[in-house]
Image (cartoon, coloured by chain):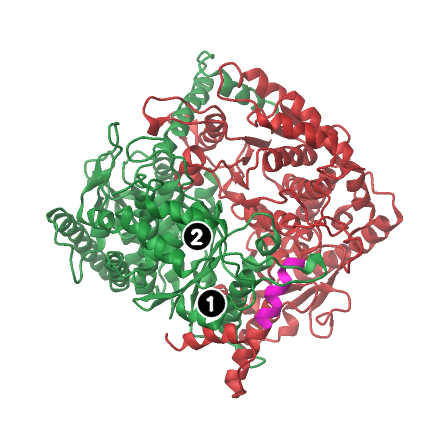
Chain colours: A red, B green
Amino acid sequence: MCDFTASKSYKKLLKLAKKPIDLTKNGVLTPKRIEKMRGSSLGFQLFYGTERVTDEVIHTLIELAKETDALEKMRDMQSGEVINKIEGFKSENRSVLHTAMRDFFEDKNPSKKAIQVSEKAYQELKKLKEFLEEIDKQDRYTDIIQVGIGGSDLGPRALYLALQTFSIKGRKAHFISNVDPDDTCKVLEGLDLSKCLVVVVSKSGSTLETLTNEEFVKKHFVQKGLDPKEHFIAVTGEKSPTDNPEKYLASFHIWDFVGGRYSATSMVGAVTLAFTLGIGNFKQVLLGASKMDKMALSHKLHENLPLLSALLGIWNRNFLHLPTVAIIPYSQALVRFTAHLQQCDMESNGKRIDKEGNFVDFETGPIIWGEPGTNGQHSFYQLIHQGTTVVPLEFIGFKNSQCKEDILIENTTSQEKLLANLFAQSIALAKGEKSKNPNKDFPGNRPNRILFASELNPETMGALLSYYENKVAFQGFIWGINSFDQEGVQLGKVLAKKIIQLFEDKRTGESKGKFPLAEMYLKHLEDF
Amino acid sequence: MCDFTASKSYKKLLKLAKKPIDLTKNGVLTPKRIEKMRGSSLGFQLFYGTERVTDEVIHTLIELAKETDALEKMRDMQSGEVINKIEGFKSENRSVLHTAMRDFFEDKNPSKKAIQVSEKAYQELKKLKEFLEEIDKQDRYTDIIQVGIGGSDLGPRALYLALQTFSIKGRKAHFISNVDPDDTCKVLEGLDLSKCLVVVVSKSGSTLETLTNEEFVKKHFVQKGLDPKEHFIAVTGEKSPTDNPEKYLASFHIWDFVGGRYSATSMVGAVTLAFTLGIGNFKQVLLGASKMDKMALSHKLHENLPLLSALLGIWNRNFLHLPTVAIIPYSQALVRFTAHLQQCDMESNGKRIDKEGNFVDFETGPIIWGEPGTNGQHSFYQLIHQGTTVVPLEFIGFKNSQCKEDILIENTTSQEKLLANLFAQSIALAKGEKSKNPNKDFPGNRPNRILFASELNPETMGALLSYYENKVAFQGFIWGINSFDQEGVQLGKVLAKKIIQLFEDKRTGESKGKFPLAEMYLKHLEDF
């Protein structure tokens, strides 16, 4: 194996990047190019003819993946090797086995560790199935409130919104995440708590926001004369402070080898998704994710879509030096999917040391942002077309809409108008347009690709989730960083605790001088 | 006046930026610095001690504002001078008078044009007031559906969500924007249309998404046996294709001197906000915005918060070369405010030519993104603390929550925990922390500032909106670009129309060969 910047292919890519292909030149962006530059598997196609790559770039990127052992590392991950670590320094020293949370179908990973973990996960799923069957019989609960933050919120919320069309009639989910008391107040407003389940999700069982909001919600139940024990479910790590079956209607487990941002297919997402969608639909999510996990092990680049996408991203990030990536689904159902990917990617790869603890001298994870199209077109696309900072785009599109209803106006449906806009943007960004009026001149060469499928349903949603999880992991493998810890969030937590203590001291009349910098802010609270 | 890069202060700032102040050094980030580096007006304070600036940098930035006539240009804008233009080229050639849409209070702008426009706007507001009084008498409508996209959606939606706590009991708003048919289907699901108003907002009266969705919604009304004429309201430009009082229950006007992204306080936002909040609350929004507009004319930098913020942003963008800005409200109510600012800023300043049509050789508008705190802390803050790309942050905070309910746990309220996290992040990002374990080492020097107020209510929301609108305008003035057109969105529209035509041709069996590149994508639709 070879370090990222020490690899031959890295040096070659640096050279190739000095003069990347000019997509605006006549004869470059042709139908043939669109036709040829395509990956495909599991009913997905990845069109990348509008990226600034040539065959030579693609071949060299494949070399890069080989030189950095990307596929071997993916196999190690899925097999349960201890890859979440920094050599020579205190670190988490864990396996990374979110893929085992859904490895219930064909071609199971044969490693002992993966099998063991997958069996544990399957037991939880069975427990959940039985619990939900009991719930169905009682016909007592219509709504579920998920209390969690970060990975215990973003993934489950994004998937719930994406698949709402497939919900059991009359069942709804709600989410409380922020410690801002207004979040809890507004979510609870108008809910009939007697019909609500509450699932409290915290792997550590010690997340400040979640424990605080749990108490806040509980207070509302008690005020209404309801017994929380009949409504509250826990999802947490075994033996965590909240792993207390006495206090909850049911408890489900997760483990430290599933990172929060990779936990949507574990019990973290399972309870809410299976309650609203039904266990059958939720299993379809798992099936789609598992199939894409297997595909991430393929040596054929044009069917290993997560690897293909990872490599294109590395080209844009490290060789074309583009600091951000906009992920733009042309699907309103994916309205919060980018927010989930923001965590998945930025918390995984927003790192500056390699796996041996050396500070890296290249760019790692980009800033991920975006809103659904066509909305974004009427918002930030001005900058994307004509701004001074180039933004690479990852479009996501589907042939069919979810709700089967559509309207034919002037001989086209809304879905067709949506797709027309998607393809138009992809072409316009790559090709640009010359004009004598500088304000109507479009520079083009704005790299973008389109991931396309037939429709957004539980199975394709699972596959899409896994596509991105594995893309992010591949980038981390190639950069040689640890994508599975998050030490960067600790300092803020420590200081927040100290300032919470200041607020407490103020209330209890204790002395000051513990944290002068923060006290200056607190002093100014009196101005308001 | 002097061009941005030709100014003396630009050159001096370049020099100062070679060695920006190191906030991690002992004795630099002191309580005294926090105390001193503060702007304040209208009940807001802007804490910027955690930016990488010195007194000298601030003085030079003030010089830059003077050399580029920033304040004079702001006065010109608010007075209705024709500033939306590119000299020597075909351009919109318009005044920019969103500030006149709310100039109904003290210190009215004395210019003839501004007075004239403000009077027109006031007439519309009066019309709206009378219309709503009539509605109140009928007691027939409980919900309003806003159909619009871009500026006709983002600002009104962000403000509605921000101020929902102040809504008239039982009144709700819903928003349809995307041409994706799933957007309309999902929003309409479960609504009792007989009690709904629909406000269709399109300045041009020709926005593809909005006209399509209007028909889609109308179809649902007709299917329910309801007469759209009794439910649909239009907000549009005078004499636009949809300016047809025959078809609507009421029509309200906007004008071409109010850009979509600056239109939240015009009739574009007024109908939905006044229906849900009451006209009194909506007028408070206007009052807050108008007060901040006046403040944007002040020569005292420490009370002209929009200018102060604009200058700090220019320091980060053009001298510290930071490509993005994260806007992070520690207030769940502002959940969609960053999405609004994304349009306001990126559509205004994502430009690459100056007002004379020359291509600029410096960076203009940054990429704007963000999610509310504390949620973001559990998502992308890893990259913000330890990533390789530095992200400057603009925090927004309030002393009090909106709902008066809170919970005391371990001697602090949730609101206090929220504030503790805000201040902790600001300090942690600036100061960092050294550690022998490289994974626990925080580089610090991550510039950030906090805009703080007592609470988020209609008046402070208006002021906050205007603060950002004017900040964006100031940056455009200083860069010498035109922040008020959006030619960059045209090419995509033109190509989309061509592809819509392809879909139509397919349906009607016409011949191909019109747009080979797009046809290749359409051909592949058959694969799915």
Single out the residue that lies furthest toward the right. A112
Q: Quadrant of residue B437?
A: bottom right
- Which numbered disc covers residue B338? 2
Q: Main secondary structure of the magenta part?
A: helix
Quarter that holds the C terminus of chain B: top right
**Left or right: where B165 falls relative to B108:** right
**Left or right: where B81 falls relative to B193:** left
Give the number of callouts. 2
Amino acid type at image mark 2? Thr
Kindly identify which chain the residue marked by label 1 belongs to. Answer: A
Amino acid type at image mark 1? Asp
Kindly identify which chain the residue marked by label 2 belongs to. Answer: B
Residue at 60% x, 57% y is B443
Task: Give the image location of residue A447, x and y in percent.
Answer: 54, 30
Q: Quadrant of residue B349?
A: top left
Give the magenta range: A487-497
Residue denoted by label 1: A182
Q: Is residue B92 above or below residue A354?
A: above
